[in-house]
């Protein structure tokens, strides 16, 4: 017997024509059986192909009916147990089993595609971070540039690297690419560079510390702040 179960949008169903054809029952007798047991069949999930719901009080549009596994199985149990009906029951069970296997395989393929998509997106993010970091570190080749950590250490300032970065950005000293990189870091996307490793012009940054009157700390406290930032 050919496949009698159809699959659409990962949903399995049998149509009325297939039930009539393979059970060798008359169209009128099958429709009458559906009509008499409409309430039970609707409860089990009888529906239209167009996904429209069926109410108990309305006349059925038989050409649009679709029978899910529960509905089809229950309907077959209501028929006389002829040899053709027995064959249909067996093939119906087998077809629904095969259809479930196909759906599971399709879901696995979809999940694999989603994983590959996420991996590609992560690679793109890592590549963007790498380019940003290379751009930031390139500034160390220029005279007068230094890392945020080094400036804090040199001035013995009582401020964290992340707070220092905020001040520098507010003053327009920290460029957008460094600020973007800092946000990537804070979101945990990459640990390539810490807040304190961002490079800025040393003299200009020290002027910001003076402007905001950032206090000095002793060496011991400074070292604790340094390790906390890392």
Image (cartoon, rainbow, N blue to C red):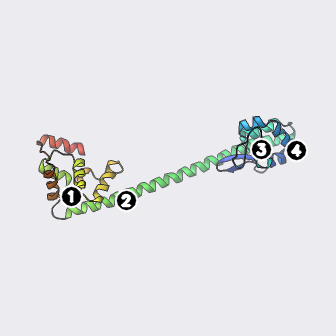
Which is more N-terminal, label 1 or label 2? 2
The answer to whether one can see residue 24 in this image is no
Cβ–Cβ below 8 Å for labels 4 and 1?
Answer: no
**Position in image of residue 149 (x %, y %):** 19, 51
Tag on residue 200?
1
**Quarter holding residue 88:** top right
Residue position marked by numbered label 2 in the rendering: 127
Disc 1 and disc 3: Cα gap in Å? 74 Å
Vertical relation: 134 (above or below) 13:
below
State which mark lies toward you, 2 or 3: 2
Judging from the image, what secondary structure is the residue with disc 3 in?
Answer: helix
Residue position marked by numbered label 3 in the rendering: 91
Judging from the image, what secondary structure is the residue with disc 2 in?
Answer: helix
State which mark lies toward you, 2 or 4: 4
Disc 2 and disc 3: Cα gap in Å? 54 Å
Judging from the image, what secondary structure is the residue with disc 4 in?
Answer: helix
**Residue drawn at 61 percent across, 46 percent down:** 104
Residue position marked by numbered label 4 in the rendering: 28
**Position in image of residue 217 (x %, y %):** 12, 43
């Amino acid at each position: 017997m050919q496949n009698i179960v159809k699959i659409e949008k990962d949903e399995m169903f049998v149509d009325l024509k297939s039930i009539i054809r393979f059970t060798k029952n008359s169209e009128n007798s099958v429709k009458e059986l559906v009509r008499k047991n409409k309430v039970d069949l609707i409860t089990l999930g009888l529906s239209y192909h167009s996904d429209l719901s069926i109410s108990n009080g309305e006349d059925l549009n038989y050409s649009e009916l679709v029978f899910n596994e529960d509905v089809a199985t229950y309907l077959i149990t209501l028929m006389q147990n002829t040899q053709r009906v027995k064959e249909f029951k067996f093939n119906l069970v087998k077809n629904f089993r095969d259809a479930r296997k196909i759906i599971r395989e399709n879901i696995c393929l979809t999940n694999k595609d989603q994983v590959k998509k996420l991996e590609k997106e992560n690679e793109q993010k890592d590549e963007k971070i790498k380019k940003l970091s290379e751009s930031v570190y390139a500034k160390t080749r220029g005279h007068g540039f230094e890392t945020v950590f080094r400036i804090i250490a040199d001035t013995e300032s009582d401020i964290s690297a992340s707070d220092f970065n905020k001040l520098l950005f507010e003053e327009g000293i920290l460029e957008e690419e460094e600020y973007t990189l800092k946000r990537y870091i804070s979101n945990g996307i990459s640990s390539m560079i810490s807040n304190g490793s961002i490079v800025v012009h040393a003299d200009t940054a020290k002027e910001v510390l003076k402007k905001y009157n950032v206090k000095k700390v002793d060496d011991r406290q400074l070292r604790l702040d340094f390790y906390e930032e890392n």
